[in-house]
Protein backbone atom coordinates (compact mmCIF):
# COMPACT_ATOMS: atom_id res chain seq x y z
CA UNK A 1 0.00 0.00 0.00
CA UNK A 2 1.39 3.39 -0.98
CA UNK A 3 1.49 6.14 1.62
CA UNK A 4 -1.18 8.78 1.01
CA UNK A 5 -0.29 12.30 -0.07
CA UNK A 6 -0.55 14.63 2.91
CA UNK A 7 -1.44 18.33 2.85
CA UNK A 8 -1.56 20.96 5.55
CA UNK A 9 -4.69 22.97 4.79
CA UNK A 10 -7.03 23.13 1.82
CA UNK A 11 -5.12 26.00 0.25
CA UNK A 12 -2.04 23.86 -0.31
CA UNK A 13 -3.63 20.85 -2.02
CA UNK A 14 -2.23 19.77 -5.38
CA UNK A 15 -3.69 16.56 -6.81
CA UNK A 16 -3.91 14.87 -10.23
CA UNK A 17 -6.97 15.87 -12.29
CA UNK A 18 -9.04 12.82 -11.39
CA UNK A 19 -12.49 12.76 -9.73
CA UNK A 20 -12.04 13.41 -6.01
CA UNK A 21 -14.15 11.70 -3.37
CA UNK A 22 -13.67 13.36 0.01
CA UNK A 23 -14.70 12.20 3.49
CA UNK A 24 -15.00 15.12 5.93
CA UNK A 25 -15.00 15.07 9.72
CA UNK A 26 -12.98 15.28 12.92
CA UNK A 27 -12.69 11.48 12.89
CA UNK A 28 -11.29 11.40 16.43
CA UNK A 29 -10.44 7.77 17.15
CA UNK A 30 -11.34 6.71 13.58
CA UNK A 31 -14.02 4.39 15.01
CA UNK A 32 -16.31 2.10 13.03
CA UNK A 33 -18.75 4.92 12.24
CA UNK A 34 -15.93 7.04 10.81
CA UNK A 35 -14.63 4.05 8.90
CA UNK A 36 -18.03 3.56 7.24
CA UNK A 37 -17.97 7.15 5.95
CA UNK A 38 -14.44 6.76 4.61
CA UNK A 39 -15.22 3.35 3.09
CA UNK A 40 -18.06 4.92 1.08
CA UNK A 41 -15.62 7.46 -0.37
CA UNK A 42 -13.09 4.74 -1.16
CA UNK A 43 -15.62 2.52 -2.90
CA UNK A 44 -17.00 5.35 -5.03
CA UNK A 45 -13.53 6.55 -5.97
CA UNK A 46 -12.47 3.10 -7.10
CA UNK A 47 -15.60 2.73 -9.23
CA UNK A 48 -14.92 6.09 -10.90
CA UNK A 49 -11.13 5.63 -11.27
CA UNK A 50 -10.82 8.61 -8.97
CA UNK A 51 -9.00 9.48 -5.76
CA UNK A 52 -10.32 9.03 -2.24
CA UNK A 53 -9.25 11.32 0.55
CA UNK A 54 -10.01 12.63 4.03
CA UNK A 55 -10.37 16.20 5.25
CA UNK A 56 -9.94 16.44 8.99
CA UNK A 57 -9.23 19.21 11.48
CA UNK A 58 -6.96 20.06 14.41
CA UNK A 59 -7.46 21.16 17.09
CA UNK A 60 -11.01 20.28 18.05
CA UNK A 61 -13.34 23.31 17.68
CA UNK A 62 -13.94 23.28 21.42
CA UNK A 63 -10.39 24.58 21.86
CA UNK A 64 -11.62 27.78 20.22
CA UNK A 65 -15.12 28.04 21.66
CA UNK A 66 -14.68 26.73 25.21
CA UNK A 67 -10.95 26.50 25.95
CA UNK A 68 -11.67 26.13 29.66
CA UNK A 69 -13.46 22.81 29.00
CA UNK A 70 -12.38 21.39 25.63
CA UNK A 71 -13.35 18.00 24.26
CA UNK A 72 -10.39 15.75 25.02
CA UNK A 73 -9.18 13.92 21.94
CA UNK A 74 -8.58 10.20 21.79
CA UNK A 75 -5.41 10.43 19.73
CA UNK A 76 -2.85 13.05 18.69
CA UNK A 77 -2.76 14.22 15.04
CA UNK A 78 0.17 12.06 13.96
CA UNK A 79 -1.45 8.93 15.29
CA UNK A 80 -4.75 9.80 13.61
CA UNK A 81 -2.94 10.32 10.33
CA UNK A 82 -1.38 6.87 10.57
CA UNK A 83 -4.72 5.18 11.32
CA UNK A 84 -6.41 7.01 8.45
CA UNK A 85 -3.56 6.07 6.12
CA UNK A 86 -4.01 2.40 7.06
CA UNK A 87 -7.52 2.51 5.57
CA UNK A 88 -6.06 2.93 2.08
CA UNK A 89 -6.99 6.51 1.22
CA UNK A 90 -5.01 8.35 -1.46
CA UNK A 91 -4.65 11.70 0.29
CA UNK A 92 -5.10 13.36 3.67
CA UNK A 93 -5.81 17.04 4.33
CA UNK A 94 -5.44 18.40 7.86
CA UNK A 95 -7.02 21.83 8.18
CA UNK A 96 -5.97 24.06 11.08
CA UNK A 97 -9.12 24.95 13.02
CA UNK A 98 -8.35 28.54 13.95
CA UNK A 99 -10.59 31.39 15.11
CA UNK A 100 -10.46 32.75 11.57
CA UNK A 101 -11.47 29.42 10.04
CA UNK A 102 -14.31 29.16 12.59
CA UNK A 103 -15.82 32.33 11.09
CA UNK A 104 -16.21 30.67 7.67
CA UNK A 105 -19.91 30.49 6.78
CA UNK A 106 -21.48 27.34 5.40
CA UNK A 107 -21.69 28.72 1.83
CA UNK A 108 -18.13 29.99 2.05
CA UNK A 109 -16.90 26.57 3.15
CA UNK A 110 -18.55 24.84 0.20
CA UNK A 111 -17.10 27.46 -2.15
CA UNK A 112 -13.68 26.92 -0.61
CA UNK A 113 -13.93 23.18 -1.15
CA UNK A 114 -14.68 23.64 -4.85
CA UNK A 115 -12.05 26.34 -5.30
CA UNK A 116 -9.27 24.33 -3.67
CA UNK A 117 -10.44 20.98 -5.09
CA UNK A 118 -11.76 21.74 -8.61
CA UNK A 119 -12.03 18.02 -9.44
CA UNK A 120 -14.25 17.39 -6.40
CA UNK A 121 -16.97 14.92 -7.39
CA UNK A 122 -18.53 14.04 -4.02
CA UNK A 123 -18.18 14.52 -0.29
CA UNK A 124 -19.01 11.94 2.38
CA UNK A 125 -20.14 12.83 5.90
CA UNK A 126 -21.99 11.36 8.84
CA UNK A 127 -25.71 12.03 9.17
CA UNK A 128 -25.13 14.39 12.11
CA UNK A 129 -22.48 16.46 10.30
CA UNK A 130 -22.50 20.19 11.07
CA UNK A 131 -20.33 22.87 9.50
CA UNK A 132 -19.94 26.60 9.01
CA UNK A 133 -19.96 29.51 11.44
CA UNK A 134 -21.93 28.67 14.57
CA UNK A 135 -22.58 25.15 13.18
CA UNK A 136 -25.17 26.75 10.89
CA UNK A 137 -24.97 24.08 8.21
CA UNK A 138 -26.31 20.54 8.37
CA UNK A 139 -26.51 17.80 5.75
CA UNK A 140 -29.51 19.35 3.99
CA UNK A 141 -27.67 22.69 3.70
CA UNK A 142 -24.61 20.86 2.39
CA UNK A 143 -26.64 18.96 -0.21
CA UNK A 144 -28.18 22.15 -1.59
CA UNK A 145 -24.91 24.08 -1.68
CA UNK A 146 -23.02 21.15 -3.18
CA UNK A 147 -25.57 20.77 -5.99
CA UNK A 148 -25.05 24.40 -6.93
CA UNK A 149 -21.26 23.92 -6.82
CA UNK A 150 -21.33 20.82 -8.97
CA UNK A 151 -20.64 17.92 -6.61
CA UNK A 152 -22.78 15.44 -4.72
CA UNK A 153 -23.13 14.51 -1.03
CA UNK A 154 -23.34 11.08 0.57
CA UNK A 155 -24.57 10.99 4.18
CA UNK A 156 -23.80 7.80 6.08
CA UNK A 157 -26.21 6.66 8.82
CA UNK A 158 -24.87 6.26 12.33
CA UNK A 159 -23.77 2.76 13.26
CA UNK A 160 -24.91 1.15 16.51
CA UNK A 161 -23.32 -1.31 18.91
CA UNK A 162 -25.27 -3.03 21.69
CA UNK A 163 -28.27 -0.82 20.99
CA UNK A 164 -26.52 2.57 21.22
CA UNK A 165 -24.89 4.79 18.56
CA UNK A 166 -21.15 4.50 18.04
CA UNK A 167 -19.50 7.84 18.80
CA UNK A 168 -16.17 9.27 19.92
CA UNK A 169 -17.87 10.46 23.11
CA UNK A 170 -18.94 6.93 23.94
CA UNK A 171 -15.41 5.64 23.30
CA UNK A 172 -14.05 8.32 25.65
CA UNK A 173 -16.42 7.26 28.41
CA UNK A 174 -15.50 3.61 28.01
CA UNK A 175 -11.76 4.26 28.09
CA UNK A 176 -12.06 6.49 31.13
CA UNK A 177 -13.91 3.70 32.97
CA UNK A 178 -11.47 0.97 31.94
CA UNK A 179 -13.94 -0.81 29.65
CA UNK A 180 -11.16 -1.40 27.16
CA UNK A 181 -12.70 -4.32 25.29
CA UNK A 182 -15.96 -2.51 24.61
CA UNK A 183 -14.05 0.61 23.55
CA UNK A 184 -12.05 -1.50 21.11
CA UNK A 185 -15.27 -3.03 19.77
CA UNK A 186 -16.49 0.48 18.86
CA UNK A 187 -13.14 1.45 17.39
CA UNK A 188 -12.96 -1.66 15.24
CA UNK A 189 -9.39 -2.31 16.39
CA UNK A 190 -7.62 -2.71 19.71
CA UNK A 191 -7.01 0.61 21.46
CA UNK A 192 -3.28 1.20 21.31
CA UNK A 193 -0.45 3.42 22.45
CA UNK A 194 2.68 3.97 20.41
CA UNK A 195 6.06 5.55 20.83
CA UNK A 196 9.76 5.02 21.43
CA UNK A 197 10.84 3.02 24.48
CA UNK A 198 12.52 5.34 26.95
CA UNK A 199 14.95 4.74 29.78
CA UNK A 200 13.35 4.16 33.16
CA UNK A 201 14.61 4.03 36.74
CA UNK A 202 15.19 0.25 36.47
CA UNK A 203 12.91 -0.40 39.45
CA UNK A 204 11.02 -3.08 37.54
CA UNK A 205 14.26 -4.93 36.89
CA UNK A 206 15.15 -4.64 40.58
CA UNK A 207 11.78 -6.16 41.50
CA UNK A 208 12.28 -8.99 39.01
CA UNK A 209 9.84 -7.61 36.42
CA UNK A 210 11.77 -5.53 33.83
CA UNK A 211 9.62 -3.15 31.79
CA UNK A 212 9.54 -1.24 28.52
CA UNK A 213 8.44 2.32 29.25
CA UNK A 214 6.36 4.66 27.09
CA UNK A 215 5.49 8.24 28.00
CA UNK A 216 1.86 7.86 26.87
CA UNK A 217 -0.03 11.06 27.68
CA UNK A 218 -2.98 11.59 25.30
CA UNK A 219 -5.58 14.27 25.99
CA UNK A 220 -8.14 11.61 26.90
CA UNK A 221 -6.33 9.26 29.24
CA UNK A 222 -7.55 5.70 29.72
CA UNK A 223 -8.26 4.63 33.27
CA UNK A 224 -5.12 4.27 35.34
CA UNK A 225 -4.56 0.64 36.09
CA UNK A 226 -3.11 -2.70 35.03
CA UNK A 227 -3.90 -4.22 31.64
CA UNK A 228 -3.15 -7.34 29.64
CA UNK A 229 -1.51 -6.08 26.45
CA UNK A 230 0.22 -7.18 23.28
CA UNK A 231 3.27 -5.40 21.88
CA UNK A 232 4.31 -5.07 18.24
CA UNK A 233 7.38 -3.58 16.60
CA UNK A 234 9.34 -3.68 13.37
CA UNK A 235 11.35 -6.52 14.92
CA UNK A 236 8.49 -9.02 14.72
CA UNK A 237 4.96 -10.03 15.59
CA UNK A 238 2.84 -9.57 18.68
CA UNK A 239 4.28 -10.35 22.11
CA UNK A 240 2.06 -10.70 25.17
CA UNK A 241 2.62 -8.53 28.21
CA UNK A 242 1.16 -6.99 31.34
CA UNK A 243 1.22 -3.21 31.67
CA UNK A 244 0.68 -0.61 34.34
CA UNK A 245 -0.59 2.76 33.17
CA UNK A 246 -0.57 5.60 35.66
CA UNK A 247 1.44 7.78 38.00
CA UNK A 248 3.07 5.04 40.15
CA UNK A 249 1.88 6.22 43.59
CA UNK A 250 3.91 3.59 45.48
CA UNK A 251 7.30 4.91 44.28
CA UNK A 252 6.67 8.54 43.23
CA UNK A 253 6.67 11.22 45.89
CA UNK A 254 5.48 14.07 43.64
CA UNK A 255 3.05 14.57 40.77
CA UNK A 256 4.45 13.05 37.57
CA UNK A 257 3.10 12.52 34.04
CA UNK A 258 1.52 9.13 33.40
CA UNK A 259 3.75 6.34 32.18
CA UNK A 260 2.95 3.07 30.43
CA UNK A 261 5.21 0.33 31.83
CA UNK A 262 5.05 -3.00 29.98
CA UNK A 263 6.45 -6.24 31.36
CA UNK A 264 6.72 -8.79 28.55
CA UNK A 265 5.47 -12.31 29.18
CA UNK A 266 7.66 -13.77 26.43
CA UNK A 267 11.28 -13.50 25.41
CA UNK A 268 12.02 -10.63 23.03
CA UNK A 269 14.82 -8.42 21.78
CA UNK A 270 13.01 -5.15 22.36
CA UNK A 271 15.10 -2.49 24.10
CA UNK A 272 15.30 1.23 24.72
CA UNK A 273 14.97 3.36 21.57
CA UNK A 274 12.82 0.75 19.81
CA UNK A 275 9.51 2.05 18.46
CA UNK A 276 6.62 -0.08 19.66
CA UNK A 277 2.84 -0.25 19.50
CA UNK A 278 1.03 -1.48 22.60
CA UNK A 279 -2.48 -2.90 22.12
CA UNK A 280 -4.55 -2.78 25.31
CA UNK A 281 -6.52 -6.05 25.52
CA UNK A 282 -8.09 -6.41 28.97
CA UNK A 283 -8.41 -4.36 32.16
CA UNK A 284 -7.12 -6.30 35.17
CA UNK A 285 -7.36 -3.86 38.09
CA UNK A 286 -7.16 -0.15 39.01
CA UNK A 287 -3.82 1.42 39.86
CA UNK A 288 -3.16 1.28 43.62
CA UNK A 289 -0.68 2.51 46.21
CA UNK A 290 1.05 -0.21 48.22
CA UNK A 291 2.72 -0.07 51.62
CA UNK A 292 6.15 -0.91 50.24
CA UNK A 293 8.17 -2.62 47.52
CA UNK A 294 7.60 -6.13 48.86
CA UNK A 295 3.83 -5.66 48.65
CA UNK A 296 4.21 -4.13 45.19
CA UNK A 297 6.39 -7.06 44.02
CA UNK A 298 3.82 -9.58 45.22
CA UNK A 299 0.99 -7.76 43.44
CA UNK A 300 2.96 -7.55 40.18
CA UNK A 301 3.40 -11.30 40.38
CA UNK A 302 -0.36 -11.73 40.73
CA UNK A 303 -0.93 -9.32 37.82
CA UNK A 304 1.46 -11.34 35.69
CA UNK A 305 -0.44 -14.54 36.50
CA UNK A 306 -3.77 -12.86 35.72
CA UNK A 307 -2.47 -11.70 32.33
CA UNK A 308 -1.11 -15.17 31.52
CA UNK A 309 -4.51 -16.66 32.40
CA UNK A 310 -6.29 -14.09 30.22
CA UNK A 311 -4.15 -14.89 27.19
CA UNK A 312 -4.45 -18.63 27.76
CA UNK A 313 -8.23 -18.27 27.71
CA UNK A 314 -8.46 -15.78 24.85
CA UNK A 315 -5.54 -16.57 22.57
CA UNK A 316 -5.29 -12.81 21.79
CA UNK A 317 -1.85 -12.67 20.18
Image (cartoon, grey):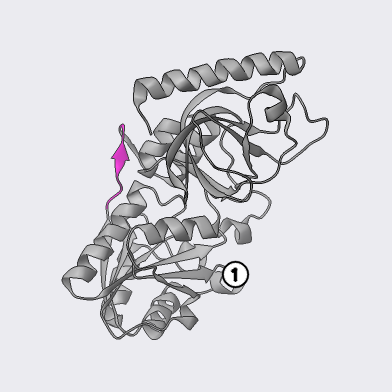
The total of numbered circles placed on residues is 1
Q: Quadrant of residue 60?
A: bottom right
Across and down, in percent, residue 242 comes to 53, 28
Q: Main secondary structure of the magenta part?
A: loop
Q: Nearer the viewer, residue 66 or 124?
A: 124
Instruction: Choose top left, top right, bottom left or bottom right for residue 58.
Output: bottom right
Q: Quadrant of the C terminus?
A: top left
List x then y, in percent, for residue 226.
57, 26
- Provide the secondary structure element on which disc 1 rests: loop
Pointer 1 residue: 98
- In this rendering, the answer to whether 226 lies above or below 121 is above
Instruction: Tell me which segment is drawn in magenta.
Output: 157-162
Q: Which residue lies at the image location 47% right of the left edge and 53% below the top edge?
A: 28
> x%, y% of residue 143?
28, 69
**Image: 74 above or below 170:** below
For the N terminus, the quadrant is bottom left
Front-most of 161 and 257? 257
Q: How far across and down, in percent of the image, does residue 47 sit?
A: 16, 70
Q: Is residue 12 left or right of residue 146?
A: right
Name the residue: 74% across, 27% down. Answer: 249
Amino acid sequence: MNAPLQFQGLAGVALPPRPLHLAIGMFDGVHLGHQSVIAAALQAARRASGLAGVLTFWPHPSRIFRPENPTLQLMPPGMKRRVLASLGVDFLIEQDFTAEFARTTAPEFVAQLKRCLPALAAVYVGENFRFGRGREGDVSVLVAAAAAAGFTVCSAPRLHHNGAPISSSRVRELLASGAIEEASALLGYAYFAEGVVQAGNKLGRTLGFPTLNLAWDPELKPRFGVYAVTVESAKGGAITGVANYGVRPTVERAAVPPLLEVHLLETSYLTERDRISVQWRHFLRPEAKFAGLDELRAQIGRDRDAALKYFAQNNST
